[in-house]
């Protein structure tokens, strides 16, 4: 059983930390904010980190890695509201989902122990959390380094300069899940937006706190050589690529903790490693991973058990029916609803008795809740009978949209003999039925975009990556959805030779950080990767509705630019970094 430790202002322990825990908070119910972190060997900085978080947080939840040997656990007990001792997870992703679900506030913010928010956030947090439209916010991450003049600055060049992170979101368990893999973000359903720099940014101190030698060990021992471009920044470092940090509170935190950490790294340090006991219960890695897998929408095995149904054995041709089905999820992950990415639906196929397919893509019927592994769900499904009388086989199946039918991956389906006649005992309304049962998505029937401004460089280095700022207007007849709705919209591109031969068909995808309604304008920072060979090319910026079409294919105007690619390396030749960015390959 997991036991948490609370610090109450009126207790003796609370009295020791009056300077850390103020008696009043900026947040009042029903919009309380919980800050969560997983930490290891952070005794030198944790108290100051918590003091910074208390400026805007109602609750602090800390999971202390049991491999810590510098007294971190004891400090966490003093400064946090809830403390857990957890088995060494190796990577944050394995513990993050479990950790987030320990929060009790209406909103939750995930911060690393080497990150703090800028002072502007505290002044805006009450307004941000009062939103009735949004489920999450992105905050831009600023990677802090030491400047040549001795001051602190943050890197603005690629890949550090544009690093929006989804860290602040509503604490509703069915809205979010955190993948188990390395360097993954929490996935959150619903609409969100990027905070302006005047509303909230956060500062990341890994490059400042660790020496070059320590960062090299981290890259090779932890990441197997990946992410070198992020952590070994000196290769691309130039004075012009750094903007001074102007927040006095951030500077004070960074400098003070740096001195303390350097002192703590001295060989004379003696540890006080907390050992698991009956008084300090240990949360196992298996327990944390099990929580994440229960809510994860990432399926690797596909299974369903059809328990009950009331499918009529006699149907009228082209008639529509409601069928009540009870299903059990025997997959290894949760089934997501219609507003998840890769949602799960109940659907069907029609076959002749001789095995010829009549209907490949049946009407989709929605799940009205997320369904965890081993859970049972009741679904009222729609089915439309074939147009010709005869004897058929109706095959009920489950489909993960855009991925596969469960039956294709070995799951059991429900096959029933059905006779279809000329009667009209159902509802002969196929057009209406299709409209009602249509998958929930942001349907576009006309596709339009107007490119208003851009700063695409006309000269690029071969295989170099660039950040390009684009301003666009949505001239479609519907809203552009973000990456966690059905059929999301991305910014992307094609590369062409001057003679019109296609070089890159599927460019990197760059996310919208908010929903964009018709006639609205949006600013996007997009990723582009130059061709591998020098030459003169045409770069065509376009918009794509994933799984549906490129806007240019439907008559929308694209932005075509003449670009020269040479042998220089003025961009960032960083293909391994591109794999970890929000800009994704299709």
Image (cartoon, helix red, strand yellow):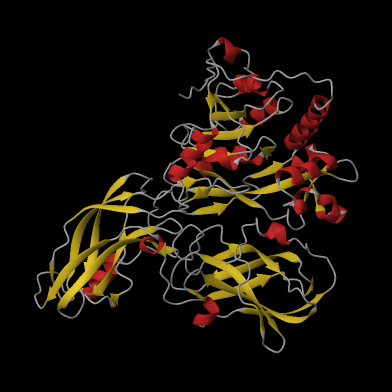
Q: Quadrant of the C terminus?
A: bottom right
Count the numbered circles shown. 0
Residue at 70% over, 28% down: 41
Q: Residue at x 71, y 25 (%)?
A: 43
User: On the image, which quarter does residue 506 sit in?
Assistant: bottom right
* Residue 131 position (above or below residue 347): above
Can residue 142 be seen from the camera position used here? yes
- Tell me if I can see residue 246 in this picture: no
Near-viewer residue (486 or 559): 486
Q: Position of residue 542 (x, y in %)?
A: 59, 74
Residue closest to the far front: 354
In the rendered view, tell whether residue 251 sits above or below residue 71. Answer: below
Q: Nearer the viewer, residue 408 or 398?
A: 408
Which residue is at a point 41% across and 58% down the rendered structure image? 343
Looking at this view, is 380 or 353 the one in front?
A: 353
Residue 288, relative to residue 43: is it above or below?
below
* Image x and y of residue 59, in percent: 53, 29
Q: Is residue 65 left or right of residue 33?
A: right
Residue 448: image location, x then y, percent: 51, 76
Residue 204 horizontal side relative to residue 240, left or right: left
Image side of residue 476 versus residue 207, left or right = left
Q: Quadrant of the N terminus?
A: top left
Point out residue 247 in the picture as x, y percentages from the top left corner: 74, 40
Q: Is residue 485 above or below residue 462?
A: above
């Amino acid at each position: 059983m997991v036991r948490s430790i609370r610090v109450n202002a009126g207790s003796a322990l609370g009295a020791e930390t009056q300077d850390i825990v103020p008696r009043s908070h900026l947040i009042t119910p029903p919009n309380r904010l919980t800050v969560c972190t997983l930490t290891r060997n952070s005794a030198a900085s944790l108290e100051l980190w918590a003091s910074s978080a208390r400026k805007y947080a109602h609750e602090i939840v800390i999971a202390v890695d049991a491999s810590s040997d510098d007294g971190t656990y004891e400090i966490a007990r003093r400064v946090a509201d809830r403390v857990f001792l957890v088995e060494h997870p190796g990577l944050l992703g394995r513990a993050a989902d479990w950790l987030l679900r320990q929060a009790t506030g209406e909103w939750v913010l995930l911060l690393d122990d080497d990150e703090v928010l800028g002072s502007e956030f505290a002044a805006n947090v009450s307004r941000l959390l009062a939103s009735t439209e949004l489920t999450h916010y992105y905050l831009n991450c600023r990677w802090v380094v030491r400047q040549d003049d001795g001051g602190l600055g943050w890197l603005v060049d690629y890949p550090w300069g544009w690093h929006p992170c989804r860290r602040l979101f509503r604490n509703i368990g069915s809205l979010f899940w955190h993948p188990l893999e390395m360097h993954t973000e929490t996935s959150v359903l619903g609409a969100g937006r990027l905070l302006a720099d005047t509303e909230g940014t956060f500062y990341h101190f890994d490059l400042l706190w660790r020496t070059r030698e320590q960062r090299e060990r981290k890259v090779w021992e932890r990441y197997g050589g990946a992410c070198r471009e992020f952590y070994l920044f000196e290769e691309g470092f130039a004075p012009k690529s750094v903007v001074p940090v102007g927040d006095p509170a951030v500077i004070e935190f960074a400098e003070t903790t740096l001195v303390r950490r350097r002192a703590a790294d001295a060989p004379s340090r003696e540890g006080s490693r907390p050992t698991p006991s009956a008084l300090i219960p240990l949360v196992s890695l298996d327990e944390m991973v099990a929580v994440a897998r229960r809510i994860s929408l990432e399926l690797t095995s596909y299974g369903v058990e059809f328990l009950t149904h009331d499918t009529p054995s006699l149907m009228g041709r082209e008639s529509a029916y409601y069928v009540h089905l009870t299903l059990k999820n025997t997959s290894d992950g949760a089934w997501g609803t219609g507003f998840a990415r890769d949602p799960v639906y109940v659907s069907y196929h029609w076959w002749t008795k001789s095995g010829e397919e009549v209907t490949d893509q049946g009407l989709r019927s929605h799940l009205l809740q997320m369904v965890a592994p081993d859970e049972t769900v009741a679904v009222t499904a729609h089915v439309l009978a074939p147009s010709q009388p005869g004897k058929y086989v109706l095959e009920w199946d489950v489909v993960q949209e855009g991925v596969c039918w469960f039956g294709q991956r070995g799951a059991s389906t429900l096959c029933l003999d059905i006779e279809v006649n000329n009667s009209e005992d159902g509802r002969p309304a196929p057009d209406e039925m299709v409209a009602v049962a249509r998958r929930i998505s942001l349907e576009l029937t006309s596709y339009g975009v107007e490119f208003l401004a851009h700063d695409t460089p006309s000269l690029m280095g071969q295989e170099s990556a660039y950040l390009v700022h684009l301003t666009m207007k949505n001239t479609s007849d519907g809203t552009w959805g973000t990456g966690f709705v059905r059929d999301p919209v991305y910014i992307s591109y094609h590369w062409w030779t001057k003679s019109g031969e296609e070089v890159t068909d599927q460019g990197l995808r760059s996310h919208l950080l908010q929903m964009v309604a018709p006639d609205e304008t949006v600013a996007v920072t997009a990723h582009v990767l130059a061709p591998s060979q020098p030459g003169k090319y045409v770069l065509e910026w376009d918009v794509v509705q994933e799984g549906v079409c490129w806007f240019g294919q439907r008559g929308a105007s694209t932005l075509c630019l003449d670009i020269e690619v040479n042998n220089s390396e003025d961009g960032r030749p960083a293909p391994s970094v591109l794999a970890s960015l929000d800009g994704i390959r299709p």
